[in-house]
Image (tube, rainbow, N blue to C red):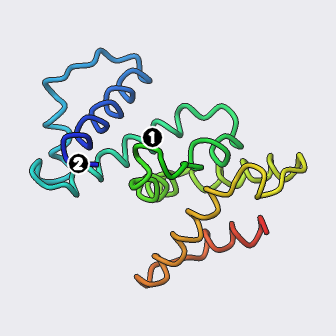
Amino acid sequence: MNMQELQAVTYRAWENRSRYHCAIVQPEYFESEISTYGDLEDRETWEKAYSVFQALNIEESCLDAYELITIQFNYPSDHAQFELRCRVFDEFLALPDGLELIKAGLEDLFGNGCTPEEQTDGFFAMVERQLRIRADRGDAVGPLKQLIEQAA
């Protein structure tokens, strides 16, 4: 995804966030809000902003926790934001109830006889990738590793 596409998807995520709160979308404030994440010329700023907005949108639109596993974080490789999925997932886990919602979703799925191969391949591949990245960086992997072990 090039910078222009990233800016467009970030705008849509920001706009959706406003709409979830029944706020009037005021485009003139968009760039000033994005600048709270860093320099507007830096791709990292836009990726961070998109990931935060998207994680919040996913949390606020979550009606059934199992959909986090089967839909929201089960990105197909041809998904437009596939390359940002791990960042969105990290931001989601950083939310106060993010990990609990993921656990609830897994409990829903496995309680209904679903196996990982049926609907969750992309989710588990992403989580395993995140475990490797976090371990390589020396970050804490405890809650994420426990999540995988419980699901296995």
- Image x and y of residue 26, in percent: 21, 20
Q: Residue at x 37, y 41 (%)?
A: 53
Give the label, 1 or 2, closer to the camera: 2
The numbered disc on residue 104 is none
Q: Secondary structure at mark 1?
A: helix
Q: Amino acid at mark 1?
A: Leu
**Residue on which the image places disc 2:** 2
Q: Name the quarter where the C terminus is drawn.
A: bottom right
- Image x and y of residue 49, in percent: 29, 46
Q: Residue at x 72, y 48 (%)?
A: 105
111, 1: nearer the viewer: 1
- Image x and y of residue 63, in percent: 65, 31
- Image x and y of residue 140, in percent: 51, 78
Tell me the CA gap for discs 1 and 2. Answer: 23 Å
Taking the image as shown, residue 148 lies to the left or right of residue 107, namely: left
Q: Amino acid at mark 2?
A: Asn
First of labels 1, 2 by sequence position = 2
**Residue on which the image places disc 1:** 56
Taking the image as shown, residue 151 lies to the left or right of residue 87, namely: right
Q: Picture quarter containing residue 31?
A: top left
Q: Residue at x 29, y 52 (%)?
A: 47
Taking the image as shown, residue 52 lies to the left or right of residue 113, namely: left
Q: Residue at x 71, y 43 (%)?
A: 66
Residue 141 vertical position relative to residue 35 in the rendered view, above or below? below
